[in-house]
Amino acid sequence: MGSRIGGDIEGLWALRDHLTGVANDILDSSDHLHRQVDRLAGDASWSGDAADDFKATWDRDVGAAVGVADTYNSVGTIVGTLADTLHNLEVQLDGAEATARKADVPVPANGGPMIGRSCLPSSQVLSAPHQEDFDLTGCGLSLPRRVAIAARRGSKPCPSGCSPTLVPARSGV
């Protein structure tokens, strides 16, 4: 079964891992540097206005680094959620295709919908200018469900329950 979702799901997972790895590297580096600066300032017994200004600036810069790391981590989480969702949709589509094939429902080679196929004999399908007289109905729905949908649309349901079909929507057509 081929991919109907498209996109590079594996690449999205790799990007997630890279972004969260960068976030962790930033946090580890800033934590290490913060400890080193505190140790050096303490060892030098540095005090006074210049020391206080430096420490305040350093604390602000460390806070900014943590903010950047949090952003990388958040984007990585979002990209990972996107990849997981796309993967789950792909699995669900594969399952639906397998179920359809098992039930002998015609499925095109690409696994996509059969839009434009007709349950009517080809002699009864109208030419393109009159296709607005036809209704596309869903495959795999029970007859009562198809009738209900068609009634809401003001058209007639496909009697055979075939895949999306062209069926007369107006009486006398």
Image (cartoon, rainbow, N blue to C red):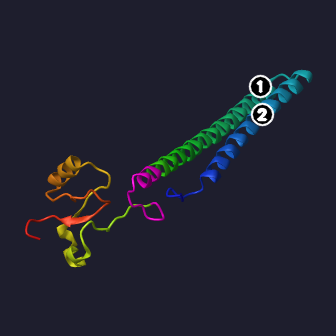
Side (left or right) of 98 relative to 12: left
Q: Residue 141, image x and y in percent?
A: 28, 50
Image quadrant holding the C terminus, namely bottom left
Query: Three-letter amino acid code at disc 1?
Result: Asp
Q: Is residue 148 left or right of residue 139?
A: left
Tally of numbered discs: 2
Q: Quadrant of residue 74?
A: top right
Q: Nearer the viewer, residue 54 or 48?
A: 54
Q: Secondary structure at mark 2?
A: helix
Is residue 48 covered in magenta?
A: no
Majority SS type along the magenta span: loop
Q: Residue furthest right?
A: 44
Task: Name the kind of residue labelled 2 in the image.
Answer: Asp
Between disc 1 and disc 2, whose residue precedes? 2
In the image, residue 105 above or below residue 86: below
Label 1 and label 2: CA atoms lie apart by 24 Å
Nearest to the observer: residue 74 or residue 11: 11
Q: Where 94 sits versus 130, above or below?
A: above
Part of the protein shown in magenta: 97-111
Residue lying at 43% horizontally and 61% vertically, measured from the top left: 112
- Tag shown at residue 28: 2
Residue 157: % across, % down = 19, 57
Residue 52: assigned label: 1
| Mark 1 crowd level (few <14, some 14–19, many ≥20, 10 Å Cα) | few
Mark 1 or mark 2, whichever is nearer to me:
2
Determine the residue positioned at 22% across, 52% down: 146
Give the answer, above or below, for where 115 lies relative to 77. below
Element under disc 1: helix
